[in-house]
Amino acid sequence: MKNFRLLSTSGTLKTRHITGLVVFFLFFLPVLVEARIYIDINSPSLQKIKIAMPDFKDFSSSKEHPELAAEFPKILGNDLDLCGYFTAIDKDAFLDEDGPKLTAKNINFKNWTAIGAEFLLKGGYTCYGRSVEVEVRLYDVLYGNQIMGKVFLGKIDDRGLVHRISNAIINAMTGRDGMFLSKIIFVGTATGSKEIYQCDYDGYNAKQITSDSSIAMYPRYSPKGDRIIYTSYKEDDSPMVYMQSLSSSRAVRVSGRDGLNYCPRWAPDNENVVLALSFKGNSDIYKIDTSGKILKQLTTHWADDLSPTFSPDGKSMAFVSNRAGNPNIFIKDLKNGSEKRLTYENQFVNGGKYNTSPDWSSQDRIVFTQMYDSAMDIFAIDPNGKNLKQLTQDSGKNEDPCWSPDGRYIAFSSNRDGGFHLYIMNANGQNQRRITFLKGEQTAPSWSPF
Protein backbone atom coordinates (compact mmCIF):
# COMPACT_ATOMS: atom_id res chain seq x y z
CA MET A 1 0.00 0.00 0.00
CA LYS A 2 1.32 3.43 -0.90
CA ASN A 3 2.11 5.80 1.96
CA PHE A 4 0.39 8.85 0.47
CA ARG A 5 -2.90 9.83 -1.10
CA LEU A 6 -3.62 12.43 -3.72
CA LEU A 7 -5.44 15.65 -3.02
CA SER A 8 -7.59 17.36 -5.61
CA THR A 9 -6.01 19.94 -7.91
CA SER A 10 -7.61 22.80 -9.73
CA GLY A 11 -6.78 24.71 -12.88
CA THR A 12 -3.83 24.49 -15.22
CA LEU A 13 -0.48 26.11 -15.03
CA LYS A 14 0.08 28.66 -17.78
CA THR A 15 3.39 29.03 -19.51
CA ARG A 16 5.43 32.00 -18.38
CA HIS A 17 8.42 33.24 -20.32
CA ILE A 18 11.49 33.85 -18.17
CA THR A 19 14.87 34.45 -19.79
CA GLY A 20 17.37 31.64 -19.30
CA LEU A 21 14.81 28.98 -18.30
CA VAL A 22 13.79 25.96 -20.31
CA VAL A 23 10.40 24.38 -21.04
CA PHE A 24 9.63 21.11 -19.30
CA PHE A 25 6.37 19.26 -18.79
CA LEU A 26 4.72 19.43 -15.40
CA PHE A 27 3.06 16.51 -13.74
CA PHE A 28 -0.42 17.73 -12.80
CA LEU A 29 -2.85 15.36 -11.14
CA PRO A 30 -5.39 14.39 -12.11
CA VAL A 31 -5.74 16.73 -15.12
CA LEU A 32 -3.48 17.11 -18.17
CA VAL A 33 -1.32 20.21 -18.00
CA GLU A 34 0.39 22.62 -20.32
CA ALA A 35 4.16 22.92 -20.65
CA ARG A 36 5.98 25.09 -18.13
CA ILE A 37 9.24 26.92 -18.16
CA TYR A 38 11.66 25.19 -15.86
CA ILE A 39 15.31 25.35 -14.86
CA ASP A 40 17.78 23.71 -17.20
CA ILE A 41 20.30 22.02 -14.89
CA ASN A 42 22.90 22.04 -17.68
CA SER A 43 22.59 25.76 -18.30
CA PRO A 44 25.91 27.64 -18.07
CA SER A 45 24.15 30.25 -15.89
CA LEU A 46 21.74 28.39 -13.69
CA GLN A 47 18.76 30.46 -12.60
CA LYS A 48 16.97 29.03 -9.61
CA ILE A 49 13.26 29.18 -8.88
CA LYS A 50 12.29 31.14 -5.78
CA ILE A 51 10.07 29.15 -3.46
CA ALA A 52 8.46 30.15 -0.15
CA MET A 53 7.96 27.49 2.52
CA PRO A 54 6.27 28.87 5.64
CA ASP A 55 6.15 26.81 8.83
CA PHE A 56 3.75 23.90 8.60
CA LYS A 57 0.47 24.15 10.44
CA ASP A 58 -0.07 21.84 13.41
CA PHE A 59 -3.51 20.27 13.01
CA SER A 60 -2.98 17.91 15.96
CA SER A 61 -5.44 18.29 18.81
CA SER A 62 -2.74 17.45 21.37
CA LYS A 63 -0.13 19.89 19.96
CA GLU A 64 2.56 17.53 21.30
CA HIS A 65 5.15 18.20 18.61
CA PRO A 66 5.21 21.91 17.80
CA GLU A 67 8.86 21.61 16.70
CA LEU A 68 7.78 19.83 13.53
CA ALA A 69 6.21 23.03 12.20
CA ALA A 70 9.67 24.46 11.53
CA GLU A 71 11.58 21.18 11.17
CA PHE A 72 9.66 19.91 8.13
CA PRO A 73 10.27 23.00 5.95
CA LYS A 74 13.87 23.14 7.19
CA ILE A 75 14.59 19.65 5.83
CA LEU A 76 12.66 20.43 2.65
CA GLY A 77 14.69 23.60 2.22
CA ASN A 78 17.93 21.63 2.50
CA ASP A 79 16.70 19.08 -0.07
CA LEU A 80 15.68 21.76 -2.54
CA ASP A 81 18.94 23.65 -2.04
CA LEU A 82 21.05 20.52 -2.60
CA CYS A 83 19.18 19.61 -5.78
CA GLY A 84 20.17 22.99 -7.21
CA TYR A 85 16.80 23.94 -8.68
CA PHE A 86 15.41 26.25 -5.99
CA THR A 87 16.22 29.17 -3.74
CA ALA A 88 14.21 29.18 -0.53
CA ILE A 89 13.04 32.67 0.45
CA ASP A 90 14.05 33.75 3.96
CA LYS A 91 11.16 33.54 6.40
CA ASP A 92 11.88 37.04 7.68
CA ALA A 93 10.52 38.35 4.37
CA PHE A 94 7.16 36.62 4.70
CA LEU A 95 3.96 38.70 4.81
CA ASP A 96 1.80 35.70 5.61
CA GLU A 97 -1.82 36.68 6.26
CA ASP A 98 -3.23 33.41 5.00
CA GLY A 99 -6.14 31.56 6.54
CA PRO A 100 -5.92 28.47 8.75
CA LYS A 101 -6.31 25.99 5.88
CA LEU A 102 -4.02 25.02 3.01
CA THR A 103 -6.39 25.50 0.08
CA ALA A 104 -6.02 28.26 -2.52
CA LYS A 105 -9.02 30.24 -1.27
CA ASN A 106 -7.26 30.59 2.08
CA ILE A 107 -4.08 32.05 0.55
CA ASN A 108 -3.33 35.72 -0.12
CA PHE A 109 -1.17 35.20 -3.20
CA LYS A 110 -0.43 38.94 -3.56
CA ASN A 111 1.60 38.79 -0.35
CA TRP A 112 3.74 36.03 -1.82
CA THR A 113 4.29 37.69 -5.20
CA ALA A 114 5.26 40.86 -3.33
CA ILE A 115 8.33 39.12 -1.86
CA GLY A 116 9.34 37.56 -5.18
CA ALA A 117 8.07 34.02 -4.63
CA GLU A 118 7.36 32.02 -7.79
CA PHE A 119 6.12 28.96 -5.93
CA LEU A 120 4.58 28.44 -2.52
CA LEU A 121 4.60 25.22 -0.52
CA LYS A 122 1.94 24.96 2.15
CA GLY A 123 1.98 22.14 4.65
CA GLY A 124 0.21 20.86 7.72
CA TYR A 125 0.54 17.82 9.96
CA THR A 126 -1.41 15.72 12.43
CA CYS A 127 0.36 13.53 14.99
CA TYR A 128 -0.92 10.16 16.17
CA GLY A 129 1.52 9.05 18.85
CA ARG A 130 4.85 8.51 17.08
CA SER A 131 3.18 8.57 13.66
CA VAL A 132 2.36 11.65 11.64
CA GLU A 133 0.21 12.52 8.65
CA VAL A 134 1.59 15.37 6.55
CA GLU A 135 -0.43 17.25 3.95
CA VAL A 136 1.39 19.40 1.39
CA ARG A 137 0.19 21.59 -1.46
CA LEU A 138 2.41 23.27 -4.04
CA TYR A 139 1.15 26.44 -5.76
CA ASP A 140 2.14 28.59 -8.69
CA VAL A 141 2.03 31.97 -6.98
CA LEU A 142 1.51 34.16 -10.04
CA TYR A 143 -1.63 32.34 -11.16
CA GLY A 144 -2.76 30.92 -7.81
CA ASN A 145 -2.94 27.39 -9.20
CA GLN A 146 -2.30 24.25 -7.19
CA ILE A 147 0.09 21.99 -9.08
CA MET A 148 0.60 19.25 -6.51
CA GLY A 149 -1.26 18.03 -3.45
CA LYS A 150 -0.58 14.88 -1.44
CA VAL A 151 -0.79 13.41 2.04
CA PHE A 152 2.16 11.41 3.39
CA LEU A 153 2.24 9.02 6.34
CA GLY A 154 5.32 8.24 8.43
CA LYS A 155 7.10 8.51 11.76
CA ILE A 156 7.71 11.89 13.36
CA ASP A 157 11.49 11.30 13.57
CA ASP A 158 11.90 9.92 10.02
CA ARG A 159 13.74 12.28 7.66
CA GLY A 160 12.81 9.89 4.87
CA LEU A 161 9.22 11.09 5.22
CA VAL A 162 10.30 14.60 4.27
CA HIS A 163 12.55 13.27 1.49
CA ARG A 164 9.44 11.64 -0.02
CA ILE A 165 7.78 15.04 -0.04
CA SER A 166 10.82 16.50 -1.81
CA ASN A 167 10.59 13.73 -4.40
CA ALA A 168 6.94 14.59 -4.98
CA ILE A 169 7.81 18.25 -5.53
CA ILE A 170 10.50 17.42 -8.09
CA ASN A 171 8.24 14.89 -9.79
CA ALA A 172 5.47 17.46 -10.05
CA MET A 173 7.89 19.90 -11.66
CA THR A 174 9.76 17.57 -14.01
CA GLY A 175 7.91 14.25 -14.26
CA ARG A 176 10.95 12.54 -12.71
CA ASP A 177 11.79 11.61 -9.13
CA GLY A 178 14.61 13.30 -7.28
CA MET A 179 17.65 11.77 -5.55
CA PHE A 180 16.31 12.32 -2.05
CA LEU A 181 15.77 8.68 -1.05
CA SER A 182 19.15 7.46 -2.30
CA LYS A 183 22.11 6.47 -0.11
CA ILE A 184 25.88 6.91 -0.26
CA ILE A 185 28.57 4.60 1.09
CA PHE A 186 32.03 5.96 1.80
CA VAL A 187 35.27 5.45 3.71
CA GLY A 188 35.40 7.21 7.09
CA THR A 189 38.12 7.56 9.72
CA ALA A 190 36.04 8.43 12.79
CA THR A 191 37.34 5.38 14.70
CA GLY A 192 40.96 5.92 13.74
CA SER A 193 40.77 3.16 11.13
CA LYS A 194 39.39 3.36 7.61
CA GLU A 195 35.93 1.79 7.78
CA ILE A 196 32.93 1.73 5.42
CA TYR A 197 29.93 3.89 6.34
CA GLN A 198 26.55 4.56 4.81
CA CYS A 199 24.49 7.76 4.96
CA ASP A 200 21.48 9.37 3.33
CA TYR A 201 22.20 11.32 0.16
CA ASP A 202 22.43 14.53 2.25
CA GLY A 203 24.97 13.13 4.74
CA TYR A 204 22.48 12.49 7.56
CA ASN A 205 21.83 9.18 9.35
CA ALA A 206 25.41 7.98 8.92
CA LYS A 207 26.08 4.50 10.25
CA GLN A 208 29.17 2.32 10.33
CA ILE A 209 29.00 -0.77 8.09
CA THR A 210 32.37 -2.44 8.75
CA SER A 211 34.41 -2.86 11.93
CA ASP A 212 37.64 -4.26 10.52
CA SER A 213 40.02 -2.00 12.47
CA SER A 214 42.11 -1.80 9.35
CA ILE A 215 42.16 0.00 5.97
CA ALA A 216 39.03 -0.29 3.83
CA MET A 217 38.97 1.13 0.30
CA TYR A 218 36.88 1.38 -2.88
CA PRO A 219 33.38 0.53 -1.60
CA ARG A 220 30.76 -0.05 -4.31
CA TYR A 221 27.06 -0.89 -4.25
CA SER A 222 25.71 -3.83 -6.19
CA PRO A 223 23.32 -2.92 -9.05
CA LYS A 224 20.40 -3.98 -6.83
CA GLY A 225 21.71 -1.99 -3.87
CA ASP A 226 21.53 -4.89 -1.42
CA ARG A 227 25.25 -5.68 -1.17
CA ILE A 228 28.55 -3.86 -1.20
CA ILE A 229 32.01 -4.89 -2.28
CA TYR A 230 35.26 -3.32 -1.15
CA THR A 231 38.99 -3.82 -0.63
CA SER A 232 40.38 -4.26 2.90
CA TYR A 233 43.77 -4.93 4.49
CA LYS A 234 42.22 -6.70 7.48
CA GLU A 235 43.86 -10.09 6.72
CA ASP A 236 47.66 -10.36 6.69
CA ASP A 237 47.92 -6.63 5.90
CA SER A 238 47.23 -7.50 2.27
CA PRO A 239 44.60 -5.89 0.01
CA MET A 240 41.81 -8.40 -0.51
CA VAL A 241 38.27 -7.99 -1.81
CA TYR A 242 35.23 -8.61 0.38
CA MET A 243 31.49 -8.73 -0.16
CA GLN A 244 28.93 -7.85 2.49
CA SER A 245 25.15 -7.74 2.53
CA LEU A 246 23.77 -4.48 3.92
CA SER A 247 21.40 -6.53 6.07
CA SER A 248 24.32 -8.36 7.72
CA SER A 249 27.54 -7.48 9.51
CA ARG A 250 29.35 -10.50 8.07
CA ALA A 251 31.77 -9.95 5.19
CA VAL A 252 32.81 -12.75 2.84
CA ARG A 253 36.19 -12.73 1.14
CA VAL A 254 35.80 -12.81 -2.63
CA SER A 255 39.40 -12.52 -3.79
CA GLY A 256 42.61 -13.00 -1.81
CA ARG A 257 45.19 -13.80 -4.46
CA ASP A 258 48.87 -12.89 -4.18
CA GLY A 259 49.60 -9.30 -5.01
CA LEU A 260 46.89 -6.67 -5.34
CA ASN A 261 43.16 -7.38 -5.22
CA TYR A 262 42.05 -3.88 -6.00
CA CYS A 263 39.36 -1.48 -7.26
CA PRO A 264 36.43 -3.94 -7.27
CA ARG A 265 33.17 -3.10 -8.99
CA TRP A 266 30.06 -5.14 -9.62
CA ALA A 267 29.50 -6.34 -13.14
CA PRO A 268 26.20 -5.13 -14.66
CA ASP A 269 24.67 -8.60 -14.17
CA ASN A 270 24.65 -8.02 -10.35
CA GLU A 271 26.15 -11.50 -9.81
CA ASN A 272 29.80 -11.15 -10.76
CA VAL A 273 32.64 -8.81 -9.88
CA VAL A 274 35.26 -7.00 -11.94
CA LEU A 275 38.54 -6.02 -10.27
CA ALA A 276 42.26 -5.44 -10.76
CA LEU A 277 44.57 -8.37 -9.94
CA SER A 278 48.36 -8.41 -10.00
CA PHE A 279 49.15 -12.06 -9.25
CA LYS A 280 50.89 -12.32 -12.64
CA GLY A 281 53.05 -9.27 -11.96
CA ASN A 282 51.41 -6.25 -13.54
CA SER A 283 47.81 -5.31 -12.76
CA ASP A 284 45.14 -6.46 -15.22
CA ILE A 285 41.36 -6.37 -14.99
CA TYR A 286 39.47 -9.63 -14.47
CA LYS A 287 35.89 -10.76 -14.12
CA ILE A 288 35.27 -13.22 -11.28
CA ASP A 289 32.23 -14.74 -9.63
CA THR A 290 31.46 -14.18 -5.94
CA SER A 291 33.25 -17.42 -5.01
CA GLY A 292 36.45 -15.94 -6.45
CA LYS A 293 36.64 -18.05 -9.61
CA ILE A 294 38.12 -16.18 -12.56
CA LEU A 295 35.62 -16.09 -15.40
CA LYS A 296 37.49 -13.91 -17.88
CA GLN A 297 40.55 -11.70 -18.18
CA LEU A 298 39.31 -8.39 -19.57
CA THR A 299 42.62 -6.58 -20.18
CA THR A 300 46.05 -7.97 -21.05
CA HIS A 301 48.91 -5.51 -21.12
CA TRP A 302 52.42 -5.06 -19.74
CA ALA A 303 51.19 -1.82 -18.07
CA ASP A 304 48.94 -1.59 -15.01
CA ASP A 305 45.18 -1.52 -15.70
CA LEU A 306 42.68 -0.80 -12.92
CA SER A 307 39.52 1.12 -11.88
CA PRO A 308 36.90 -0.44 -14.21
CA THR A 309 33.52 1.21 -14.78
CA PHE A 310 30.77 0.20 -17.20
CA SER A 311 28.68 1.99 -19.82
CA PRO A 312 24.89 2.18 -19.21
CA ASP A 313 24.27 -0.72 -21.63
CA GLY A 314 27.11 -2.81 -20.14
CA LYS A 315 28.77 -3.23 -23.55
CA SER A 316 31.82 -1.07 -22.84
CA MET A 317 34.22 -0.60 -19.94
CA ALA A 318 36.30 2.45 -19.07
CA PHE A 319 39.44 1.89 -17.04
CA VAL A 320 42.73 3.50 -16.03
CA SER A 321 46.05 2.44 -17.52
CA ASN A 322 49.59 3.80 -17.54
CA ARG A 323 50.33 2.16 -20.89
CA ALA A 324 50.88 5.64 -22.38
CA GLY A 325 53.39 6.56 -19.68
CA ASN A 326 51.11 8.32 -17.20
CA PRO A 327 47.72 7.16 -15.88
CA ASN A 328 45.00 7.90 -18.42
CA ILE A 329 41.50 6.65 -19.15
CA PHE A 330 40.81 4.08 -21.85
CA ILE A 331 37.60 2.49 -23.14
CA LYS A 332 37.26 -1.16 -24.11
CA ASP A 333 34.51 -2.57 -26.32
CA LEU A 334 33.64 -5.77 -24.46
CA LYS A 335 32.19 -7.41 -27.57
CA ASN A 336 34.96 -6.95 -30.14
CA GLY A 337 37.81 -6.34 -27.67
CA SER A 338 38.96 -3.05 -29.18
CA GLU A 339 40.50 -0.44 -26.87
CA LYS A 340 40.83 3.31 -27.36
CA ARG A 341 42.39 6.07 -25.31
CA LEU A 342 39.95 8.67 -23.98
CA THR A 343 42.13 11.30 -22.26
CA TYR A 344 45.10 13.06 -23.87
CA GLU A 345 47.39 15.78 -22.59
CA ASN A 346 46.46 18.21 -25.39
CA GLN A 347 42.83 18.20 -24.24
CA PHE A 348 43.71 20.12 -21.09
CA VAL A 349 45.04 23.62 -20.53
CA ASN A 350 47.29 22.36 -17.75
CA GLY A 351 48.70 19.38 -19.62
CA GLY A 352 46.45 16.76 -17.99
CA LYS A 353 48.97 13.94 -17.68
CA TYR A 354 47.44 12.12 -14.69
CA ASN A 355 43.78 11.07 -15.08
CA THR A 356 42.18 8.50 -12.77
CA SER A 357 39.01 7.30 -10.98
CA PRO A 358 36.51 7.19 -13.87
CA ASP A 359 32.80 6.66 -13.25
CA TRP A 360 30.30 6.18 -16.11
CA SER A 361 26.83 7.66 -15.64
CA SER A 362 23.39 6.48 -16.67
CA GLN A 363 23.33 9.59 -18.91
CA ASP A 364 26.43 8.34 -20.78
CA ARG A 365 28.99 10.78 -19.33
CA ILE A 366 32.30 9.83 -17.72
CA VAL A 367 33.54 11.76 -14.71
CA PHE A 368 37.13 11.45 -13.51
CA THR A 369 39.88 13.01 -11.39
CA GLN A 370 42.87 14.80 -12.83
CA MET A 371 46.03 15.54 -10.85
CA TYR A 372 48.40 18.27 -12.01
CA ASP A 373 51.09 20.10 -10.06
CA SER A 374 49.66 20.10 -6.51
CA ALA A 375 46.03 20.33 -7.61
CA MET A 376 43.36 17.64 -8.06
CA ASP A 377 40.20 18.50 -9.94
CA ILE A 378 37.18 16.75 -11.38
CA PHE A 379 36.31 16.68 -15.08
CA ALA A 380 33.54 15.12 -17.17
CA ILE A 381 33.68 13.97 -20.78
CA ASP A 382 31.56 12.09 -23.32
CA PRO A 383 32.72 8.55 -24.21
CA ASN A 384 33.64 9.80 -27.70
CA GLY A 385 36.09 12.31 -26.21
CA LYS A 386 33.90 15.36 -26.81
CA ASN A 387 32.33 17.93 -24.47
CA LEU A 388 35.13 17.92 -21.90
CA LYS A 389 34.23 20.11 -18.92
CA GLN A 390 36.15 21.01 -15.77
CA LEU A 391 33.78 20.80 -12.79
CA THR A 392 35.95 21.90 -9.85
CA GLN A 393 38.62 24.58 -9.76
CA ASP A 394 40.63 26.55 -7.18
CA SER A 395 39.02 24.66 -4.29
CA GLY A 396 41.57 22.30 -2.77
CA LYS A 397 42.01 18.69 -3.81
CA ASN A 398 38.90 17.08 -5.29
CA GLU A 399 38.73 13.36 -6.01
CA ASP A 400 36.70 10.12 -6.01
CA PRO A 401 33.78 11.36 -8.16
CA CYS A 402 30.71 9.15 -8.58
CA TRP A 403 27.35 9.68 -10.23
CA SER A 404 23.90 9.68 -8.69
CA PRO A 405 21.64 6.94 -10.11
CA ASP A 406 19.87 9.39 -12.43
CA GLY A 407 23.14 10.89 -13.69
CA ARG A 408 22.16 14.43 -12.66
CA TYR A 409 24.50 14.78 -9.65
CA ILE A 410 28.04 13.91 -8.63
CA ALA A 411 29.32 13.05 -5.16
CA PHE A 412 33.02 13.56 -4.46
CA SER A 413 35.52 14.15 -1.67
CA SER A 414 37.38 17.42 -1.17
CA ASN A 415 39.72 18.98 1.39
CA ARG A 416 38.65 22.55 0.58
CA ASP A 417 37.52 22.99 4.21
CA GLY A 418 40.57 21.34 5.76
CA GLY A 419 40.29 17.56 6.00
CA PHE A 420 38.55 15.51 3.33
CA HIS A 421 34.73 15.47 3.44
CA LEU A 422 31.95 14.58 1.02
CA TYR A 423 30.31 17.06 -1.33
CA ILE A 424 27.70 16.87 -4.05
CA MET A 425 27.22 19.02 -7.12
CA ASN A 426 25.06 19.18 -10.22
CA ALA A 427 26.30 17.35 -13.31
CA ASN A 428 27.50 20.64 -14.78
CA GLY A 429 29.60 21.44 -11.69
CA GLN A 430 27.25 24.02 -10.23
CA ASN A 431 25.77 24.10 -6.74
CA GLN A 432 28.67 22.42 -4.91
CA ARG A 433 27.61 21.65 -1.33
CA ARG A 434 29.30 19.86 1.57
CA ILE A 435 27.15 17.06 3.01
CA THR A 436 29.26 15.35 5.72
CA PHE A 437 30.32 16.98 8.98
CA LEU A 438 31.46 13.89 10.82
CA LYS A 439 34.51 13.24 12.95
CA GLY A 440 37.61 12.39 10.93
CA GLU A 441 37.67 12.32 7.14
CA GLN A 442 35.23 10.95 4.57
CA THR A 443 36.40 9.80 1.15
CA ALA A 444 35.67 7.38 -1.73
CA PRO A 445 31.87 7.84 -2.04
CA SER A 446 29.68 5.44 -4.02
CA TRP A 447 26.05 6.34 -4.75
CA SER A 448 23.31 3.75 -4.41
CA PRO A 449 21.63 2.57 -7.65
CA PHE A 450 18.25 4.07 -6.64
Image (cartoon, rainbow, N blue to C red):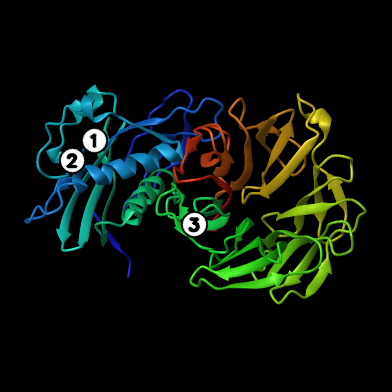
Find numbered disc 3 in the image and state the secondary structure of the residue it sits on: strand
Residue at position x 71%, y 66% in the image: 236
Mark number displayed over residue 144: 1
Tell me if residue 41 can be seen. yes
Left or right: 50 as drawn, with respect to 325: left
Amino acid under disc 2? Ala
Amino acid under disc 3? Gln
Image position, residue 317 (x, y; %): 76, 55
Tell me if residue 11 can be seen. no
Amino acid under disc 1? Gly
Q: Evaluate if marks 3 and 1 touch, with contact meaning CB atoms under 8 Å apart.
A: no
Image position, residue 267 (x, y; %): 69, 64
Label 2 vs 3, first from the N-terminus: 2
Q: Give the answer, above or below, for where 111 lies relative to 67.
A: above
Residue at position x 31%, y 57% in the image: 158
Q: Residues within 10 Å of mark 2 (few under 14, many from 20)?
A: many
The residue wearing badge 2 is 104
Q: Evaluate if marks 1 and 2 touch, with contact meaning CB atoms under 8 Å apart.
A: yes
Q: Evaluate if marks 2 and 3 touch, with contact meaning CB atoms under 8 Å apart.
A: no
Residue at position x 67%, y 49% in the image: 360
Q: Nearer the viewer, mark 3 or mark 1?
A: 3
Left or right: 298 as drawn, with respect to 302: left
Quarter placement of the N terminus? bottom left
The residue wearing badge 3 is 198
Mark number displayed over residue 201: none
Find numbered disc 1 in the image and state the secondary structure of the residue it sits on: loop
Q: Give the answer, above or below, for where 14 lies relative to 301.
A: above
Image position, residue 170 (x, y; %): 40, 45
Q: Residues within 10 Å of mark 3 (few under 14, many from 20)?
A: many
